[in-house]
Image: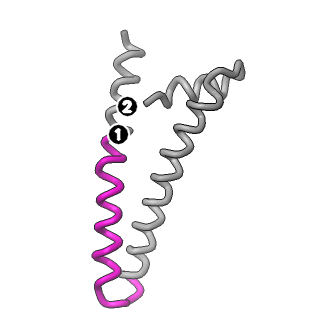
Amino acid sequence: MREFISDSIYTVIKWLGNVLGIPGNILSAIVWLRRRKNSSAIYLAALAINDLVILFILITLRHYVIRYYSELEFPLFVSSAVRLQP
């Protein structure tokens, strides 16, 4: 029961981060790129774009691990695939 609750909490936090992170970073990058082109605005826009790329990489990697490595007997891949289920 404890494992089910922790997996459920992990799943909710994971999807909440994706749902809020992707539009939030897109909006942040647009806002900072439309402002004056000072170093702070460029830095914050680059940070938002970097966060967006990391989110897309994590989503892709999560599905890749589940799809291709969930049936292997290696503990690293099995534990990752079990923990990363959608």
Image coords of residue 37 (percent x, y): 37, 90
Q: Which residue is mark 1?
A: 15
Instruction: Give the position of the C terminus as an image quadrant.
Output: top left
Q: Which residue is mark 2?
A: 11
| Residue at the (45%, 73%) spot, across then down | 46
- Marks 2 and 1 close (CB-CB < 8 Å): yes
**Residue range (magenta):** 15-40
Per the image, is 34 magenta? yes
Amino acid at the residue labelled 2: Thr
- Label 2 residue SS: helix
State whether the magenta stretch is mostly helix, strand or loop: helix
Q: Which mark is residue 35?
A: none
| Residue at the (43%, 68%) spot, across then down | 47
Per the image, is 77 magenta? no
Image coords of residue 44 (percent x, y): 38, 74
Q: Is residue 41 above or below residue 57?
A: below
